[in-house]
Image (tube, grey):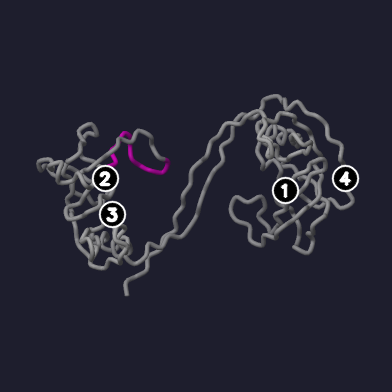
Amino acid sequence: MSEVLTAPLVVEFPFTRSLGPVQGAFLTGLRERTVLGIRARDGRVVVPPVEYDPVTADELRDLVEVAPTGTVTTWAWNPSPRRGQPLTTPFAWVLVRLDGADTALLHALDAPAPEAVRTGMRVRIRWAVERTGAITDIACFEPAEGAAAEHHVTSHSGEFADPVTGITAPARLDYTYAPGGAQSRYIQALAERKTVGERCPACRKVYVPPRGACPTCGVATGEQVEVGPRGTVTTFCIVNIKARNLDIEVPYVYAHIALDGADLALHARIGGIPYGQVRMGLRVEPVWTEGARFPDHYRPTGEPDADYDSYKELI
């Protein structure tokens, strides 16, 4: 039985967005230790504030200030905090209806054990020492038993010095990838500098990389077929934006390449030629580096360009 391959993978990118007058005022207020909500058309105070009424969809601008104390409406215990969460020790996720608000705010509650948390308990905001205009300016909630409820709500202009106008939120997904039997065999063959696909027993097409089943016929594929190593550029694009952690100078060319004997084009980088000379029909071959498990890039073979009719179905 072949080795089952797994690999830890991370998908990460920073999401940058601009803020309008409502969200900008809310986050700027947190920086100033002020919690703002917004009054909806039915008179309810919504915290965090929204730009449009959740019932009527009317634009909302009536900002109000609410108290930093509130009541837990529901909760869940988190025994194993993960990277990037508000606290590094076990804590409770809580929905807190701040005094003066009619909706609940989700955040962390610093509590010693789940037995110390209950619906209806009184809590208050623990502010971060350094505040930048983000939801993390609320470090967490903490118990505030005996704190009287303050229902007084005051209007607020939403105006602050040096307002926050945009945020960058990091998005990250950590997971373990298991390619399955078909792709494991494909990856293991690459380690031997071979490219293998699988042939569909019904339509007889060879798919690279193999998927374990034919995407057209829906039947299992098992017959392995070695393809390439040479192939034909079917389509391509010129990349002008440098990706973080990718040691490739821009501009460079990324292309779909139909390997000889394959009925599906795979994608790879084209090198060894000025990017302005890359073209559809260009014949290419893989270039390997020492110890690599896949080709570093593809380069021209020097053969005449392939005839369009030979690869038009693979574009």
Disc 2 to disc 4, how far (Cα)? 64 Å
**Disc 3 marks which residue?**
294
Query: Could you tell me which residue is drawn at 29 percent across and 47 percent down?
Result: 267
> Tag 2: residue type?
His
Sequence-first disc among 2 and 1 = 1
**Disc 2 marks which residue?**
256
- State which quarter of the image contains the N terminus: bottom left
> Tag 3: residue type?
Phe
Residue 94: where, in percent of width, then height? Answer: 72, 53
Discs 2/3, front: 2
274 part of magenta stretch: no
> Tag 1: residue type?
Cys
Disc 4 to disc 1, how far (Cα)? 19 Å
Q: Secondary structure at mark 2?
A: strand
> Would you call the spot at circle 2 few (<14 residues within 10 Å), some (14-19), or many (20 or more)?
many
Numbered range of the magenta stretch = 244-255
